[in-house]
Image: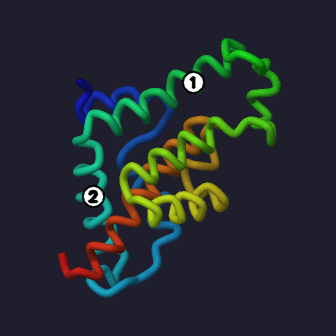
């Protein structure tokens, strides 16, 4: 099963690093009790990210997004040409479903709502990624940040 290092080896091919994910999360950071500075939030986010990516199921979902991205770019996905894929058409919703699934897997409904914030605003690295990867990483950030905010309220 892939571990955190393995998933980042794969993600690095797309310019996605732990720092790029954390930087994108911090662009929409909102101070909360327990994480009232960006420095505290950054540390808390990285801890939550490490914990989330210790789950092989989550790593496999993120990995699936990389495979779908490659297939879409090469025209290998059924029902959509490579040219259509690159335009991220409105009718393509499988990418959104994957992002929502990742966010809910990590953070439940709170994660899903955080996913929406990141998916709509596309901070940092999210604005540079293709249809599947931007939603998968937005889901990862949404789920992780929702857990970060929830734990900060519990004083953990």
Quarter-of-image position of residue 113 = bottom right
Compared across the picture, whether 36 is left or right of 118 comes to: left
Pointer 2 and pointer 1: residues touching (CB < 8 Å)?
Answer: no
Quarter-of-image position of residue 17 = top left
- Please tell me whether mark 1 sits on a helix, a strand or a loop: helix
Q: Is residue 25 above or below residue 41?
A: above
Compared across the picture, whether 17 is left or right of 68 comes to: left
Number of residues whose C-alpha sits closer than 10 Å to that of mark 1, classed few (under 14), some (14–19) or many (20 or more): some
Q: Earlier in the sequence, mark 2 or mark 1?
A: 2
**Which residue, as the protein is rendered here, is positioned at the far left?**
156
As drawn, the label of residue 48 is: 2
Q: Quadrant of the C terminus?
A: bottom left
Residue 39 appearing in the image:
no
Q: Position of residue 9 (x, y in %)?
A: 34, 28
Q: Quadrant of the N terminus?
A: top left
Number of residues whose C-alpha sits closer than 10 Å to that of mark 2, classed few (under 14), some (14–19) or many (20 or more): many
Q: Position of residue 128 (x, y in %)?
A: 62, 43
Q: Which residue is mark 1?
A: 68
């Amino acid at each position: 099963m892939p571990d955190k290092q393995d998933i980042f080896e794969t993600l690095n091919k797309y310019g996605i690093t732990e720092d790029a994910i954390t930087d994108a999360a911090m662009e929409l950071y909102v101070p909360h009790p327990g994480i009232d500075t960006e420095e505290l939030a950054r540390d808390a986010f990285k801890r939550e990210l490490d914990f989330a990516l210790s789950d092989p199921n989550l790593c496999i979902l993120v990995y699936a997004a990389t495979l779908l991205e490659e297939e879409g770019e090469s025209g290998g996905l059924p029902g959509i040409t490579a040219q259509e894929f690159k335009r991220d058409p409105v009718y393509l919703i499988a990418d959104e479903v994957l992002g929502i699934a990742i966010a809910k897997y990590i953070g439940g409904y709170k994660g899903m709502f955080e996913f929406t914030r990141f998916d709509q605003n596309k901070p940092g690295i999210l604005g540079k990624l293709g249809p599947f990867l931007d939603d998968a990483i937005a889901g990862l950030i949404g789920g992780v940040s929702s857990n970060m905010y929830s734990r900060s309220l519990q004083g953990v």
